[in-house]
Image (spheres, rainbow, N blue to C red):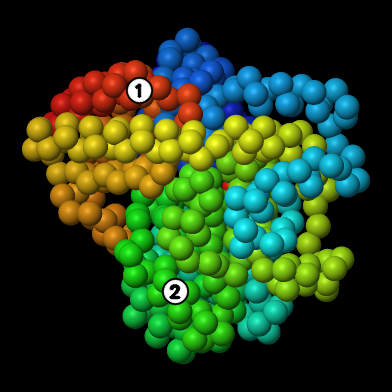
Amino acid sequence: MTGRSHEVMERARALFPGGVSSPVRAFRGVGGEPFVVDRGAGSRIWDVDGREYIDYVLSWGPLVLGHAPPIVLDALEQTMARGTSFGIPTALEVELGELIVARMPHVEMLRFVSSGTEATMSAIRVARAVTHRDVILKFDGCYHGHADSFLVRAGSGVATLGLPNSPGVPDALAALTVVAPFNDLSSTESLLASHDVAAIIVEPVVGNSGFIAPDPAFLPGLRALADRFGALLIFDEVMTGFRVAYGGARERFDVVPDLTTLGKVIGGGLPVAAYGGRRDLMECVAPAGPVYQAGTLSGNPLAMAAGIATLTALTPALHDRIAARTARLVQGLRECAARRGIPFTADAAGSMWGFFFRAEPVRSFAEAKTSDVERFRRFFHAALERGVYLAPSAFEAAFVSAAHSDADVDETLDRLDAALEASDA
Ligand SMILES: *Cc1c(COP(=O)(O)O)cnc(C)c1O
């Protein structure tokens, strides 16, 4: 890395741990130095040295309409002129709440927060309060934000850095989180039989240990097990919400969770997340009920306006169009790799996708870790040199936005085919 990016990163490293505001941005998973972004428009971003990239990270998922969509910018401008924060109810939060509930009817009542981390930690507080149980069951490689209870075998960020558990999390708290392999119903069942589990929390399609789809029986099986053992089922849809289907995982898999966490897309690129679900459960949240949770900037008008503009624009027809382009990209990549005889597996759900350098499909984080990470690193840098920005870790999902045209997909396939060739050392 040369030029302004290098200069800015040198200054950043003196200020921020690893030079970044969130670990995976530091490129530790792929080596080398991150570029510094200057601006984005549509499917593209430009770094401060003027290099252009087709972006498949999209701010780690939120930008389902692409960068700087006029419809979101207009909404922000109009809202901003009236004030940026009040800490008083606004009509905007009602409007965004109603848009979400219309698309996810099992979310009968919800609360806005500012990050996915807050959403998941609040959801398990509700689950613990209503079940009078303390243990949380999660899956190996699933990431649910950085709250203490979830930093137990938490996927990408942690895995890429080689920190399976974080120092600073009290053992006594970590002991209240039990972990089963994803797609493994029998391990889940024995953990439920041996612990008083308040809630099973799952990424319905995993995006945080690379892209891993659930087996057809897995999510229905979790629903049945939760009911049998008196635990709640929480779908962490911070990433999958408004990505894997127009109505998220419940629509795609026809399994209804008790609680759902949302984030990323619902904020259209501004900091918004939410937790919600069954009315009787959400009625326990303060001030309707005794479970405390609050936030100074929760329901922030700018963030609500960006979310409203995004969800309004994201019609079922548009969702399907983005999903079709995603499927074409993934199929094209499979064909490129097959032609070159490179072990490769790729998959998509809606506008979320991912791949591993491994011949067989991946069903768990343990299997993901058997993929060829060295080859991924070479491929990542070869793609970046050719103007395609993929997540800088072998254990992250990728995304497509409404701004990615068919021509973008064709151009991406050409560039990534050349990157596959270059990485085939
Ligand atoms: C990104 C993510 C989170 C955390 O959200 P933040 O806004 O980064 O705190 C939680 N769960 C899942 C599934 C995520 O992908």
Residue 351 in percent (x, y) is at 42, 40
Q: Secondary structure at mark 2?
A: helix
What residue is at 45 percent from the left and 89 percent from the top? 193
Residue 203 in percent (x, y) is at 47, 59
Q: Nearer the viewer, residue 283 or 397?
A: 283
Residue 35 in percent (x, y) is at 46, 23
- Residue 206 is tagged as none
Q: Nearer the viewer, residue 216 or 389?
A: 216
Which residue corresponds to mark 2? 222
What residue is at 48 percent from the left and 29 percent from the top? 402
Q: Is residue 377 visible?
A: no
- For the residues labelled 2 and 1, say whether their Cβ atoms are less than 8 Å apart: no
Q: Is residue 380 visible?
A: yes
Along the polypeptide, which appears first: circle 2 or circle 1? Answer: 2
The N terminus - image quarter: top left
The C terminus - image quarter: top left
Left or right of 393 on screen, residue 330: left
What residue is at 35 percent from the left and 54 percent from the top? 212
Q: Secondary structure at mark 1?
A: helix
CA–CA distance between discs 2 and 1? 38 Å
| Crowding near the residue tagged with mark 1, few <14, some 14–19, many ≥20 C-alpha atoms within 10 Å | some
Q: Amino acid at mark 1?
A: Asp
Classify residue 268 by image quadrant.
top right
Q: How many marks?
A: 2
Classify residue 340 by image quadrant.
top left
Residue farthest along the bottom direction in this orientation: 194
Q: Is residue 382 above or below residue 24?
A: above
Which residue corresponds to mark 1? 406
Q: Amino acid at mark 2?
A: Leu
